[in-house]
Amino acid sequence: KDQAKQMEQIRTALAGGTNLLVVNVVTSGDPDIAQNVLDAAGDIPVVFFNRAIGNEGSDVTFLKDHATACFIGTDAPEAGHMQGKMVGDYVLANFDTLDLNGDGKITYAMFKGEEGNAEAIARTQFGVEDADAVLTAAGKAALEYFDAQAAQKWQTDPEGAWSAKAAKDYMDTNLVSYNEANGNMIELVICNNDGMAEGAVASLQQAGYNVAGAHVVPVFGVDATDAAKALIAEGAMIGTVKQDNVGMAAAICETVKAIAGGKTPAEALASLNDDRFSIAPECGSKLYVAYAPYMGE
């Protein structure tokens, strides 16, 4: 994760005669970095992908101002909305089982992958808000953060690495004070990605939960990694949101081929004909690759 090193690699590629760049920026959400890439590229088209090149709104302005650039990624809020709906539906269907202390409320922990990252922000917000909408519509109490005194209703990986280790370390510490013996056990875990979900599951299993014959504290992630799918198959994790990496790769390849054939980046995106892809309504230079919920085969 070294933005300066990436810029050095880009300049080296350009000096070697590259006539098109495909860039997953190291620093997410910063249009100044994207501007630096375009300044280096000059008239050479740039396909940005995956990590956002600006916060919602600023990226649209940036893309509209630069006809040589386009972005292929995911609609940052979509994964959070999808995860939140999944969490709400599951909690509603299993409320009494999950409510370990019988207080009529479900307490949750939230593990955030990175501060300042558009997808992390959206997942952290909507993963709870949309779950609350499902619960309150059915007459149930909204989710309650496990630590009522906390200023922030999430715990962030201090390295910004969305890591299993960070989530496990947090969960290990949380469970010392928040447990069944104290009557305040964490009853639900929502994670920005599957790596953090794996860490949370590991901590819960270490404490005797989420194993065969024991109570399962529902854990939700995003990405549908093979490891997460295996945990879901075992019943140790409940659900995740599939980010279609194959679809993203296909979108990038088709876009590059179209640009090489003489189309502008926006024209290249418009030429893609695939149900997995949609052009952002606010910007013709921005392509979304769809997410999908995953709770097992």
Image (cartoon, rainbow, N blue to C red):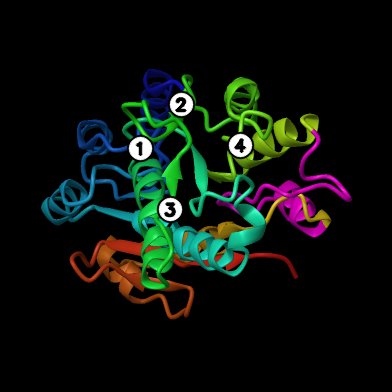
* First in residue order: circle 4 vs circle 3: 3
Q: Relative to residue 234, is residue 185 depicted above or below? A: above
What mark, if any, has residue 117 been given in the picture?
A: 1
Residue at 84% in and 45% down: 211
Report the span colored magenta: 208-233
Task: Tell me if residue 260 can be seen.
Answer: no
Nearer to the camera, 136 or 155? 136
What mark, if any, has residue 127 been given in the picture?
A: 3
In reply to whether residue 212 is colored magenta, the answer given is yes
**Quadrant of the snapshot with the C terminus:** bottom right
The residue under label 4 is 185
- Of helix, strand and loop, which one carries label 4? loop
Assign the magenta stretch its main secondary structure: loop
* First in residue order: circle 1 vs circle 3: 1
On the image, which quarter does residue 90 sit in? bottom right
* Mark 1 to mark 4 CA distance (whole Å): 30 Å
Q: Position of residue 192 (x, y in %)?
A: 50, 43
Nearer to the camera, 200 or 4? 200
Q: Of the residues shown, which amino acid type is indicated by label 2?
A: Gly
Q: Relative to residue 238, is residue 186 depicted above or below? A: above
